[in-house]
Image: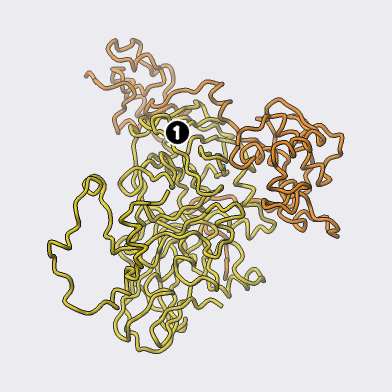
């Protein structure tokens, strides 16, 4: 039985097979006319591996916890540089934060130089864009009473960094350097009394900041398929 | 964006009183037009190539909400565009009338599909990058799914169903199941969430539970039988069926498998103080609305009318739709059109003889999970707060005045 097929193309029935196989199931000899054979992770049955290999695999179907391998072999492997260049998701742990640093004082300068004040107001208030400084003379220290203000409402300082890095300035997103984003984050945290004026923000210090709303937000439900939104809602 | 074809403009300027639907009844009740040579539509290259609708059909989208707040916003940018549900028939929204929600005004990135890539990385066994060509080779599915904006809420100020409910639409989406791609990359045990991200200026990202990603999320390149429209995410859009609209990342270019709720750009907007509101922040509730007759329309007189509307739920398929023609005193089962698909608009119909008296029309959806669409009063009572906190899936009443005019009956 000789299966002629383009590399990477697997017949539908192979979906029924386990996604990978132990090394002893692999064919001993590569099938010379198919490039498939150079990829050991391919489903063994694509090869003329022989009757016993297939039989052994069929016996494994149904519950054996094997590591998953690719079924179709489509797609290419990105380089580490590809991934780094695109990965702008910042975890609460800050693990993706790039090198760089900034202080509130530097941030105040960036805030003016980059035109932030034009939309958010000179002091982070009274602008067209959302307010950035908590309201004065609020009797409450509850972060939910201080308005929808990013550097107060955000549970993690990494979110402030992520938000500025992705979304600012309007129409010139992605133009700020890492140092500038650290500096702006430091400035916003400082004017909201989250950090002192001599604090330095970098990849190490930023995730350690205790934000006012760290634990005051409701966790999301443990979503499962077929689950009602909220048991007993609204009656 | 927006058509500037001269023939269309001319027609709109000429006072397009002949809106579609009921008002046609106001035209002189003659035998109707006979096709004479002078009334034939002139052929054109455009009509050969792509076609267009009749110039007598003038149904269009509008900025949402209609009272200039917050779209267009302080910067004059239109954020949201609502679909003309009052003119809808069937369950599919034409792509050109599909609602549009944006994070930053009506910018649409122009993406060459030959250059577009989808990268899946993070807590996977094998990070992979897919071209559009790669994706077209993989096993595909086609499914009708609604997308609804979390801000699709009714208010007493709204005067049409487009204003009260126009931020929902339903298209037939074609693409590769995200689970197919995630199985191709393999997911490490610690991978409990994904962060999906698009190409647009803020690359709006949302954290999505892995359970959902592996269940029915769809990486769609097709919409209503053709490529996804640019305003809806060309060339690639993530469908997260039944979840709030913002989860359905447009211009999808990256899926990162992560170990926790990542609290990223879009997640910030989902922060809640109360667990009840947080729980209501994923899945759209069971919802329905009567699209005919609806506010702003005019019934020509007493007699027979087929009441028609749309029902949907983020929890699955619509199980039942009831209609009340007496303000909610009695409820009757409506007829469901065909098969009710999971997380899809479902057309319902109810035969009604109007006696010419003032009354209220209501509809109520129950989904396959048994979740029931609440009244506004029930929601207010649950939260002990005025209005409808959280996502609004409340029952929409339409008041039929004795002169046949139809009004929003929310007070």
Element at badge 1?
helix
Q: Which chain, by letter, is orange?
A: A
What's the residue at 31%, 27% (across, down)? A10
Q: Locate the N terminus of chain A and report the quarter of the image it occupies.
A: top left
Q: Locate the C terminus of chain A and report the quarter of the image it occupies.
A: bottom right
Image position, residue B159 (x, y; %): 48, 72
Image position, residue B220 (x, y; %): 40, 42
Image position, residue A30 (x, y; %): 33, 11
Image position, residue B404 (x, y; %): 38, 83
What's the residue at 49%, 59% (across, down)? B63
Mark 1: give few (<14), some (14-19) or many (20+) Cα within 10 Å. Answer: some
Front-lying residue, A220 or A165: A165
User: Position of B247 compared to A97: left or right?
Assistant: left
Q: Which chain, by letter, is yellow?
A: B
* Up-down relation of residue B226 to residue B356 (above or below): above
Q: Taking the image as drawn, is residue A60 in sight?
A: no
Front-lying residue, A146 or B19: B19
Disc 1 marks which residue? Answer: B183
Q: Taking the image as drawn, is residue B94 in sight?
A: yes
* Up-down relation of residue B16 to residue B129 (above or below): below
What's the residue at 77%, 50% (across, down)? A133
Chain containing mark 1? B
User: Position of A185 compared to B104: left or right?
Assistant: right
Front-lying residue, B222 or A233: B222
Which quadrant of the structure image shows residue B18? bottom left
């Amino acid at each position: 039985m000789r299966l002629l097929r383009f590399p990477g193309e697997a017949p539908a029935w192979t979906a029924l097979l386990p996604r990978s196989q132990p090394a002893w199931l692999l064919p001993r000899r590569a099938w010379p006319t198919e490039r498939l054979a150079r990829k050991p992770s391919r489903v063994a049955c694509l090869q003329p591996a022989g009757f016993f290999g297939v039989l052994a695999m069929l016996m494994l179907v149904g519950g054996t916890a094997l590591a998953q391998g690719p079924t179709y072999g489509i797609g290419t492997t990105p380089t580490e540089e590809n991934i780094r260049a695109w990965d702008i998701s910042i975890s609460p742990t800050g693990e993706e934060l790039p090198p760089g640093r900034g202080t509130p004082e530097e941030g105040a300068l960036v805030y003016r130089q980059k035109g932030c004040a034009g939309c958010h107001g000179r002091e982070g208030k009274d602008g067209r864009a959302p307010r950035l400084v908590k309201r004065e003379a609020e009797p409450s220290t509850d972060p939910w009473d201080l308005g929808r203000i990013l550097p107060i409402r955000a549970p993690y300082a990494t979110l402030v960094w992520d938000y500025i890095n992705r979304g600012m300035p309007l129409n010139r997103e992605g133009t700020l350097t890492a140092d500038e984003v650290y500096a702006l984050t430091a400035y916003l945290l400082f004017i909201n009394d989250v950090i002192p004026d001599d604090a330095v923000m970098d990849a190490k210090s930023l995730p350690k900041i205790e934000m006012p709303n760290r634990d005051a937000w409701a966790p999301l439900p443990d979503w499962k398929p077929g689950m009602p939104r909220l048991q007993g809602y609204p009656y | 964006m927006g058509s500037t074809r001269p023939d269309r403009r001319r027609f709109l300027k000429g006072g397009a009183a002949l809106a579609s639907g009921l008002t046609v009844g106001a035209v002189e009740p003659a035998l109707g037009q006979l096709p004479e040579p002078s009334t034939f539509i002139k052929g054109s290259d455009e009509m050969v190539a792509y076609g267009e609708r009749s110039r007598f059909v003038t149904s269009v989208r509008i900025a949402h909400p209609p009272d200039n707040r917050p779209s267009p916003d302080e910067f004059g940018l239109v954020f949201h565009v609502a679909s003309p549900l009052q003119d809808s028939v069937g369950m599919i929204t034409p792509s050109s009338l599909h609602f549009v929600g944006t994070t930053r005004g009506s910018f649409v990135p122009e993406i060459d599909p030959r250059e577009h890539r989808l990268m899946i990385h993070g807590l996977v066994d094998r990070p992979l990058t897919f071209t559009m060509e790669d994706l077209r080779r993989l096993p595909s599915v086609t499914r009708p799914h609604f997308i609804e904006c979390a801000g699709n809420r009714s208010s007493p100020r709204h005067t049409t169903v487009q204003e009260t409910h126009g931020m929902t639409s339903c298209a037939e989406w074609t693409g590769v199941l995200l689970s197919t791609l995630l199985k191709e990359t393999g997911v490490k045990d610690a991978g409990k969430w994904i962060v999906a991200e698009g190409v647009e200026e803020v690359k709006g990202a949302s954290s999505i539970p892995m359970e959902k990603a592996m269940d029915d999320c769809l990486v769609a390149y097709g919409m209503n039988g053709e490529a996804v429209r640019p305003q809806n995410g060309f060339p690639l859009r993530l469908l997260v069926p039944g979840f709030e609209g913002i989860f359905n990342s447009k211009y999808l270019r990256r899926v990162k498998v992560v170990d926790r709720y990542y609290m990223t750009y879009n997640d910030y907007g989902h922060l809640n103080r109360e667990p009840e509101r947080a729980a209501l922040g994923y899945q759209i509730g069971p919802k329905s609305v009567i699209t005919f007759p609806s506010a702003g329309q005019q019934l020509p007189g007493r007699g027979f009318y087929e009441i028609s509307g749309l029902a949907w739920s983020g929890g699955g398929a619509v199980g039942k739709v009831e209609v009340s023609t007496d303000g909610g005193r009695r409820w009757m089962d409506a007829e469901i059109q065909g098969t009710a698909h999971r997380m899809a608009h479902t057309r319902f119909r109810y035969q009604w003889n109007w006696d010419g008296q003032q009354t209220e029309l209501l509809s109520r959806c129950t989904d396959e999970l048994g979740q029931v669409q609440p009244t506004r009063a029930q929601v207010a009572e649950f939260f002990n707060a005025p209005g409808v906190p959280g996502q609004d899936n409340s029952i929409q009443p339409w008041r039929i005045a004795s002169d046949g005019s139809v009004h929003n009956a929310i007070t």
